[in-house]
């Protein structure tokens, strides 16, 4: 466990050691999962981990029961067995840590700490005795505390209990660190792999994804220059070079909507696949509009050419479909769809349109590129929690007349939607069309994958985290057992080039950019 590590990286490592960590409790605020810290409690190990909500980085490691975890400092045990039996339970039944004398011998002298009175028990208080990056809490009677008393003598007396807890944090002292504990920039990277000696071979981590419209996404990295993804232009080779190989590849083989597609023929005519029709003279053709009563040889040759075009188009479509896939970057927090190039999304009315060539005319017939990016929020209580690390994003292409600051992933969807409705209002032909397009579509995540849309729904790969031996509660208190009222229900809201997946508490859990 390393301070600054991401919630996804930490929880994934803990879940991989089930014998060492047999029970995991995930605690979060159901109505404000981003604004409030996320707590991972390991009751069988006596350890509690606190992560900030917006970035989901490990900020505080607490040891609340010294008997359940073996701790050492420079090969010296933090708690000795004889000390636990003799001193701990003599002074306080809830104190399981080392005595002040033992702490002093291990770490040496330090500056005076602070006394924090108890709100529940006025007769007692907690003395926080801290060193750089580590602090110990000792219970002592409120009557024995005085700012003028000698700290060492007081903590060494019989009235002071052994340490009740220990905190590991980033800062010179607990008094100085706790003010901005959850907001200061962490020193360590999100992934433990980047902290190891072989970090040169690991791709740099992504800090934030900036959406600039028209299929342009700027990935701001921790120490390297930004990497730009231009949808329908960036190739899979570009992604592997800049982001590393994907953690997984998901084949996009669902074609349940293909029955509704209409095939285009030469001359602007259409033919529905798989439907036969009979002409008036008794002849049969797979496409009724391709039949002509004339026996002219030119018409016959034209029909053969059209059939060849249909066969070639079918083969190309099958080849493209077999190659389409998602590059899953779990450690970066997003998925990228690799498929045939498409038309770029329209620009924001508040920005200047870029001069881009149409990828459908400038690229070969079969040319796979990145066409969609799904940015995951890793919201506690959501169906896909801990599948990806949290990906933070900002919308830099939708300034309004009232506000020019970007929309961010930490904002509620109500505020995001209000700005986007104002920005894109001129793109709709009528208020009815605007209301129809922006109406939310309910999706149940527990029923499997989506048949296909602007937003790709990838699900059903792993079970959720278990909290207190039960299914993890959702944002509205549901257990997520798979019923219609479970946490699998989300809503999709679309705007030009973007689809938002929103939880019942108004939190955006995923953003698809296309």
Image (cartoon, rainbow, N blue to C red):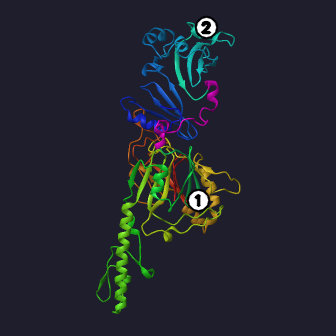
Q: Where is residue 301 drawn, in percent x and y?
A: 35, 87
On the picture, is 79 further left or further right than 349? Answer: left
Decide: is 409 above or below 258: above
SS of the residue under disc 1: strand
Mark nearer the N terminus (1 vs 2): 2
SS of the residue under disc 2: helix
Q: Where is residue 91 drawn, in percent x and y?
A: 51, 10
Q: Which mark is residue 153?
A: 2
Decide: is 283 above or below 151: below
Label 1 sits on residue:
213
Q: Where is residue 199 drawn, in percent x and y?
A: 48, 40
Residue 487 vs residue 238, the one in the foreground: 238
Residue 197 on the magenta segment: yes
On the picture, is 9 further left or further right than 181? Answer: left
Q: Where is residue 124 drawn, in percent x and y?
A: 59, 15
Residue 142 vs residue 78, the one in the foreground: 78
Task: Identify the magenta region.
Answer: 172-201
Kindly indicate the quadrant of the structure image that contains residue 12: top left
Classify mark 1: residues with Cα within 10 Å, few (<14), some (14-19) or many (20+). many
Residue 466 appearing in the image: no
Classify mark 2: residues with Cα within 10 Å, few (<14), some (14-19) or many (20+). few
Residue 162 on the magenta segment: no
Residue 409 vs residue 222, the one in the foreground: 222
Q: Residue at x 38, y 83 (%)?
A: 289
Q: How many marks?
A: 2
């Amino acid at each position: 466990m390393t301070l600054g590590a991401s919630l996804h990286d930490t929880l994934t490592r803990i879940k991989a050691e089930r014998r060492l960590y047999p029970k995991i409790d995930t605690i979060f605020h159901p109505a404000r999962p981003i604004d409030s810290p996320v707590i991972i409690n390991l009751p069988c190990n006596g350890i509690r981990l606190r992560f900030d909500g917006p970035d989901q980085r490990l900020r505080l490691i607490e040891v609340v029961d010294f008997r359940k975890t073996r701790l050492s400092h420079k090969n010296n045990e933090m708690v000795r067995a004889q000390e636990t039996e003799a001193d701990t339970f003599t002074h306080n039944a809830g104190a399981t840590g080392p005595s002040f004398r033992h702490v002093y011998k291990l770490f040496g002298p330090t500056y005076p700490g602070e006394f924090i009175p108890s709100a529940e028990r006025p007769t007692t208080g907690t003395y926080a005795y801290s060193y750089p990056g580590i602090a110990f809490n000792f219970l002592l009677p409120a009557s024995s505390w005085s700012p003028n008393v000698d700290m060492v003598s007081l903590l060494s007396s019989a009235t002071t209990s052994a340490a009740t807890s220990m905190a590991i944090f980033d800062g010179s002292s607990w008094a100085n660190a706790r003010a901005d504990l959850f907001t200061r920039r962490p020193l360590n990277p999100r992934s433990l792999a980047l902290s190891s000696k072989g970090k040169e071979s690991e791709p740099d981590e992504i800090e934030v994804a900036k959406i600039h419209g028209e299929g342009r996404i700027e990935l701001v990295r921790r120490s390297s220059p930004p990497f730009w993804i231009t949808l329908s232009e960036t190739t899979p080779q570009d992604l592997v070079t800049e982001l590393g190989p994907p953690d997984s590849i998901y084949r996009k083989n669902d074609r349940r909507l293909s029955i509704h597609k209409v095939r285009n023929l030469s001359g602007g005519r259409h033919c529905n696949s798989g439907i036969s029709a009979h002409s008036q003279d008794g002849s049969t053709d797979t496409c009724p509009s391709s039949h002509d009563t004339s026996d002219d040889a030119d018409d016959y040759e034209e029909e053969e050419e059209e059939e060849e075009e249909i066969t070639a188009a079918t083969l190309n479509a099958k080849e493209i479909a077999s190659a389409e896939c998602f590059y899953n970057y779990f450690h970066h927090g997003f998925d990228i769809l690799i498929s045939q190039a498409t038309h770029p999304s329209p620009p924001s009315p508040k920005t200047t349109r870029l001069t881009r060539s149409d990828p459908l005319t400038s690229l070969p017939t079969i040319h796979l590129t990145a066409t969609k990016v799904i940015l995951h929020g890793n919201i506690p209580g959501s169906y896909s929690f801990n599948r990806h690390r949290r990906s933070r994003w900002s919308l830099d292409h939708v300034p309004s007349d009232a506000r020019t600051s970007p929309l961010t992933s930490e904002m509620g969807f109500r505020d995001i939607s209000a700005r986007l409705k104002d920005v894109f209002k001129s793109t709709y032909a009528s208020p009815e069309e605007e209301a129809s397009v922006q109406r939310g579509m309910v999706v149940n995540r527990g029923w499997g994958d989506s048949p296909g849309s602007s937003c790709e729904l990838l699900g059903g790969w792993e079970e959720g985290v278990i909290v207190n031996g039960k299914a993890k509660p959702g944002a509205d208190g549901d257990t997520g057992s798979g019923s219609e009222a479970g946490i699998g229900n989300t809503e999709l809201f679309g705007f030009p080039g973007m689809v938002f997946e929103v939880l019942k508490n108004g939190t955006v859990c995923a953003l698809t950019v296309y």
